[in-house]
Image (tube, rainbow, N blue to C red):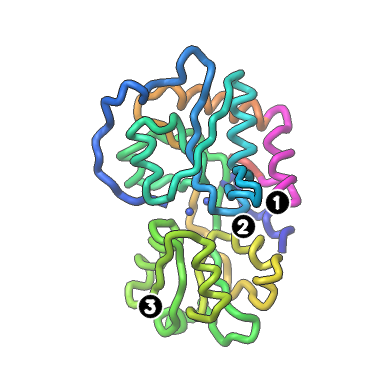
Amino acid sequence: MLCAVTAIAALTGCSNGQDETLTDNPEATNVANGEVLRIGTEGAYAPFNYTSADGTLSGFDVDLANAICADMKVTCEITAQDWDGIIPGLKAGKYDAIVAAMSITPERAQQVSFTDPYFSNALVFLAKKDSSFNPNNSDDIDTHSIAAQRSTISSQWLEGEYPQADMKLYDTLSNAFLDLESERVDAMISDKLPAIQWLSSPTGSDYVIKGDEIDINDNFAIAVRPGDELQAKINQSLANLRANGTYDEISQKYFAVPAASN
């Protein structure tokens, strides 16, 4: 299944729609003197960002953030933040940018500025191998309980396309996978790459992707505060990393093959 990743264009998990105004916090400024870039990530969305057994943050987003910092010749300070509070944390000045498999949406674009996309995402349904669940049949979606992470593109798409579906929402993707494994739900909708990684684990070995993958033109990008000069600086670093092969090296580490970038 990992070979299928090549079909995904340059990309993970999601808007919470808060309406807080931009902060006057004096710390909420551009990177000072080019020394430190503070990054917020979720730390619970493997393979993009997750917390390792020793408590350190790892994943594609973390490695990409570190590579951007190296290219900009600044020091990275990466902080974990619960998903529902990740945009408010940026606006409150807790960090300077969000690198967390965040999808570009019109709602988020009213609160933050996005860099160029760095990954493209598709959605998939998961269910047990012996399940008759077939998401290509819309009646199956409406008549089965389906897990999804709260405030993500997955849950928003499902709610918009199938408002009658019995949707079970979870604060983290891991908790959604846990209830799927425990058979407290019939199926689950997820971003494709986290789903593939879970399917390759012992806990996901009895499950498969059901139906066709769903292309919703979903692109992941880095978020900064509106008007922040970091947007242009990060865009330049992303271009540099694609040109010098660093982007493909990071992709190969997590996705087995280079992920095509926009």
Tell me if residue 221 comes above or below residue 53 in the rendering: above
Return the residue at label 1: 255
Please report the residue visible at 70 percent of the width from the left and 51 percent of the height from the top: 255
Query: Is residue 170 in view from this perspective?
Result: yes
Left or right: 235 in relation to 259: left
- The percent position of residue 6, horizontal first and vertical second, equals 69, 53
Return the residue at label 2: 193
Query: Mark 1 to mark 2: distance in Å?
Result: 8 Å
Please report the residue visible at 60 percent of the width from the left and 28 percent of the height from the top: 68
- The percent position of residue 221, horizontal first and vertical second, equals 50, 40
Please state which of residues 167 and 35 is positioned toward the viewer in this rendering.
35
Q: Main secondary structure of the magenta part?
A: helix
Q: Residues within 10 Å of mark 3 (few under 14, many from 20)?
A: some
- Label 3 SS: strand
Q: Residues within 10 Å of mark 2 (few under 14, many from 20)?
A: many
Q: Residues within 10 Å of mark 1 (few under 14, many from 20)?
A: many
Q: Earlier in the sequence, mark 1 or mark 2?
A: 2
Q: Amino acid at mark 2?
A: Leu
Please report the residue visible at 38 percent of the width from the left and 51 percent of the height from the top: 84
Bounds of the magenta span? 243-259
Q: Amino acid at mark 3?
A: Asp
Magenta segment includes 92: no
Q: Earlier in the sequence, mark 1 or mark 3?
A: 3
- The percent position of residue 249, horizontal first and vertical second, equals 74, 38
Q: Amino acid at mark 1?
A: Phe
